[in-house]
Amino acid sequence: MSIKLNDKYLSSFVNDHAYSMIQPQVTLADSMLRSKSGPGNTFLGWIDLPVNYDKEEFARIKTCAEKIKKTCDVLVVIGIGGSYLGSRAVIEFLKSPMYNSLKKDTPDIYFAGNCISTDSLNEILAVCEGKDICVNVISKSGTTTEPAIAFRVFRALLEEKYGKEGARERIFVTTDKARGTLKEFSTAAGYETFVVPDDVGGRFSVLSAVGLLPIACAGIDIDELMAGAASAMEKYKDPNLENNDCYRYAALRNILNRMGKSVEVLASYEPFTAMLSEWWKQLFGESEGKDQKGIFPSSVIFSTDLHSLGQFIQDGTRTMFETVINVENTGSSFKIPEDHANIDGLNFLSGMDLNDVKKTAMNGTILAHVDGGVPNIVINVSDRNAYSLGELIYFFELACAVSGYLLAVNPFNQPGVESYKKNMFALLGKPGYEDLRVELEERLKN
Ligand code: PA5
């Protein structure tokens, strides 16, 4: 069993009857999800994606990844939000946050089109100079501004470097199977395309071609990732909270939220989980933060952030609870050396594995934070491998869906994301937004 929830540190915060009281709501949420009768029910394709995926496309992803590995030094992955966070999270978790600096037989991977920063774009262009480049542009709608700008830039670069024919062999597009500007453009240009399934929203799409192609290009075993997710799919079918850690996590978040805990801090002691936290923040933030409700998802990497946010967590406003991701076996070890002079006074640690120091720091911190009034949930992840990560990804996706239903929101839409886009388009002078432009400019003047 790769993923195990430990809720023993909640005993001073959550009464046993809280679980039995919320059980009927969990059972209802589960049944709405499984019978596809709840809000957002046209976006439930992720539920059985670990087994019910396009096998022909999956094989094509592997072939394409081999081709990309052979033909380029750099893969530029263009996408934003759900179209990039998942693959980046998996690559950093399983390889390294310093993946590009590792000695490897796979291409460097840079992520572009996920912001509107001139410096960021110029920096990626600079590191691509003199290198052989492939591009995977990912956009379900095919119209998102940030990746569209980046794609325009990299397409021109590739066409200049390799000619139109050569660029065609190096541009890979992941988008809707039939609709959208990007799809139409790709068909006309003859690019190889992969599909974002209709019934899978961006933030639930890491186990589709959206995440899998870049992940496979990094040399990660995507069969194992899917196998881990498939095992979670089986494991979390029983709605009984006694038998289902995933639903227990979803229920606990809501029990704590109803007690006034409106901020969840995802804590980990491993920097390789930092991007996973970013993926998790989007998953929960975009799914639950609506109708003036939701738990604000935030994250920390300890012990680094114990020296910046530790004070606040221990002693500041009491609105938060912590969920600790504990990766038990990372696959590496490091013995702290002996120093005869012992000038730093650290010889009491000599010969100890750094992993054990970390575990001790984690245990001590959990107890201190619990004493400070911060409920702590621990999610134990047995190994830093593709199987466990697949299981964890599915654990969070399913927990998010159930948690959203417990909160009585539609976890599968994101109406709030449109507001900034509307204003941005109006202010940039996009045709069709003329009246709004006048109104906004007036407001900005005053
Ligand atoms: O989860 C989501 O739906 C969003 O984060 C989208 O993935 C993001 O806005 C990018 O959209 P698209 O893939 O259409 O470019």
Image (tube, helix red, strand yellow):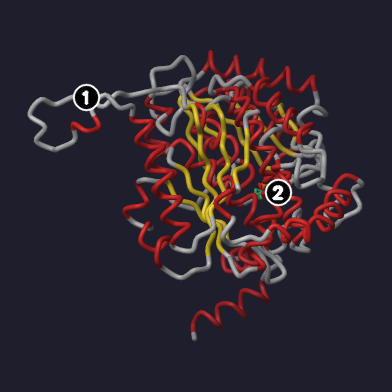
Amino acid type for the residue under numbered disc 1: Pro
Whether residue 442 sits left or right of residue 430 in the image: it is: left
Nearer to me, 258 or 34: 258
Amino acid type for the residue under numbered disc 2: Arg
Task: Name the residue rendered at 53%, 47% in the picture.
Answer: 278
Residue 293 appears anywhere in the view: yes
Displayed quadrant of residue 425? bottom right
Q: Residue furthest bottom?
A: 446
Whether residue 421 sits left or right of residue 18 in the image: it is: left
Mark-to-mark CA distance, 1 and 2 = 42 Å
Q: Position of residue 417 (x, y in %)?
A: 65, 61
Compared to residue 158, the image places residue 240 above or below, namely: below
Q: Position of residue 373 (x, y in %)?
A: 48, 64
Whether residue 371 sits left or right of residue 168 in the image: it is: left
Neighbor class of circle 2 (other Cα within 10 Å; few <14, some 14-19, many 20+) is many
Residue 155 appears anywhere in the view: no
Displayed quadrant of residue 228? top right
Task: Name the residue rendered at 39%, 18% in the picture.
Answer: 103
Query: For the residue labelled by badge 2, is the local secondary structure a helix, a strand or a loop?
Result: helix
Task: Name the residue rendered at 45%, 26% in the picture.
Answer: 108
Q: Position of residue 430 (x, y in %)?
A: 64, 62
N-terminal-most mark, 1 or 2: 2
Task: Name the residue rendered at 74%, 46% in the picture.
Answer: 201
Q: Which residue is mark 1?
A: 337
Q: Which dot marks residue 38?
A: none
Give the mark count. Answer: 2
The reply to whether callout 1 and callout 2 are in contact (CB within 8 Å) is no
Nearer to me, 47 or 262: 262
Neighbor class of circle 1 (other Cα within 10 Å; few <14, some 14-19, many 20+) is few
Compared to residue 275, the image places residue 173 above or below, namely: above
Q: Which residue is mark 2?
A: 248
Displayed quadrant of residue 411? bottom right
